């Protein structure tokens, strides 16, 4: 990971870090296989982003002002947090028990939402014979112009001249300015994430299913700065476990970049909901709801009982 010493390096550093699960310049045999098959080594099967958008990159490098201007790697695909981070949650809860892990389980809630992963094991001591947890993973959104031209350069084996691909793209799109204009939209992520944790957490609490929320540590720090929930002490009852992982710069045995746990913290749903509703995100949701209700009222009839 390149350090910027507080200076933005957009336009001077190749913006893509990983493609189809491996460093873009990897020489590992497993990388060549994943690239030839457009496969995701974390989720298994074909890369979903490649199928939908022809954009098979997993992470980008960016120097964010809110992160002291340091050039860091940011996962921009939820599946990048599959594998070891999800396995950590499973092991943290179940230990060494035999566990089944399934993906995309629909919650019977309002509104209906998919749970990224559900892990369960047989346990005669449980009321229905099953121990079970829900696991959510959260990546970071890209904003601005994106890094598609850089991926085009990579596909053509021309990463040394990647900047020229942005110039060509600017000409095709008839843009006035030729620039590399992407960023990481953490603000959008924590607002959406904060809401989803509240909604899914309430549903899961009703059915007595603990929730794990897996993300990069930078997102966890931003979430906690805005939703100031109270962590529980070790051994106390909890409903939600947040876990923050970061890239270490090391490679695993196959040549993939490693993600390591930086922090995990547990809280109760009541503490989280109290912190969320008193936060800027909770206040913003109320304002949005009130505005929508007022917009529905016919002109000159606000304040009248019209049902």
Image (tube, rainbow, N blue to C red):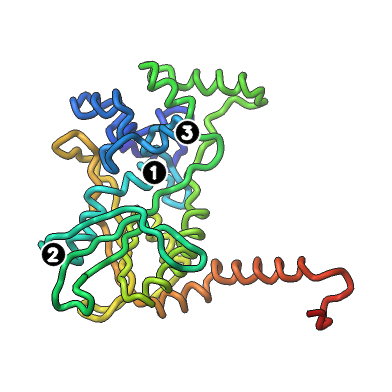
How many marks on residues? 3
Q: Position of residue 6 (x, y in %)?
A: 43, 43
Q: Residues within 10 Å of mark 1 (few under 14, many from 20)?
A: many
Q: Residues within 10 Å of mark 2 (few under 14, many from 20)?
A: few
Q: Quadrant of the N terminus?
A: top left
Q: Name the one closer to the observer, 252 or 131.
A: 131
Label 2, on which residue?
95
Q: Quadrant of residue 101?
A: bottom left
Q: Which residue corresponds to the image point at 23% horizontal and 26% vertical from the top-left?
A: 33
Q: Which residue is mark 1?
A: 77
- The furthest residue to the left: 96
Give the mark nearer the N terminus: 1 vs 3: 3
Position in image of residue 126 (x %, y %): 19, 77
Disc with the residue nearer the chain's start (3 vs 2):
3
Q: Farthest residue to the right: give it.
A: 300
Depth check: give the residue in front, 222 or 87. 87
Q: Is 92 above or below relative to 269?
A: above
Label 1 or label 3, whichever lies nearer to me, is 3
The location of residue 88, given as percent across then percent down, is 21, 57
How far apart in space, not on screen, are marks 3 and 2 (Cα)?
Answer: 38 Å
**Distance from Cα at disc 2 to Cα at disc 1:** 27 Å
Q: Is residue 294 toward the left or the right of residue 175 in the image?
A: right
Q: Position of residue 138 (x, y in %)?
A: 39, 53
Residue at coordinates 59% horizontally, 67% vertically from top-left? 285
State the image quarter where residue 122 is shown. bottom left
Give the camera-side residue of 237 and 16: 237
Circle number at residue 53:
3
SS for dot 1: loop
Which of marks 1 and 2 precedes in the sequence?
1
Q: Is residue 255 left or right of residue 297?
A: left
The residues tagged by marks 1 and 3 sit, at their Cα atoms, a distance apart of: 12 Å
- Element under label 2? loop
């Amino acid at each position: 990971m390149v350090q910027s010493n507080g200076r933005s390096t957009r336009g001077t550093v190749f913006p893509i870090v990983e493609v189809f699960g491996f460093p873009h310049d990897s020489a590992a045999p497993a990388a060549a296989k994943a690239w030839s098959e457009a496969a995701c080594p974390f989720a298994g099967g074909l890369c979903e982003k490649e199928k939908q958008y022809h954009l098979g990159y997993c992470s980008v490098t960016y120097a964010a002002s809110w992160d002291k201007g340091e050039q860091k790697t940011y996962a921009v695909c939820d599946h990048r947090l599959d594998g070891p981070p999800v396995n950590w949650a499973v092991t943290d809860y179940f230990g060494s028990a035999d566990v089944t892990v399934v993906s995309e389980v629909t919650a019977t809630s309002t509104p209906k939402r998919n749970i990224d992963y559900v892990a369960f094991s047989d346990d005669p001591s449980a009321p229905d014979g099953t121990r079970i947890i829900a696991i959510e993973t959260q990546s970071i959104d890209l904003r601005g112009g994106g890094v598609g031209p850089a991926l085009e350069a990579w596909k053509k084996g021309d990463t040394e001249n990647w900047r020229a691909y942005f110039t060509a793209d600017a000409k095709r799109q008839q843009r006035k300015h030729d620039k590399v204009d992407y960023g990481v939209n953490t603000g959008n992520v924590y607002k959406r994430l904060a809401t989803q944790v509240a909604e899914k957490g309430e549903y899961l609490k009703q059915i007595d299913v603990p929730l794990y929320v897996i993300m990069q540590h930078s997102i966890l720090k931003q979430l906690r700065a805005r939703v100031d929930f109270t962590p529980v002490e070790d051994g106390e009852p909890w409903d939600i476990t947040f876990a923050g992982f970061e890239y270490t710069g090391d490679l695993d045995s196959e040549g993939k970049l490693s993600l390591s746990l930086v922090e995990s913290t547990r809280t109760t749903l009541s503490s989280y909901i109290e912190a969320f509703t008193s936060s800027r995100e909770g206040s913003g949701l109320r304002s949005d709801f009130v505005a929508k209700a007022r917009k529905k009222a016919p002109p000159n009839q606000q304040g009248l009982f019209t049902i």
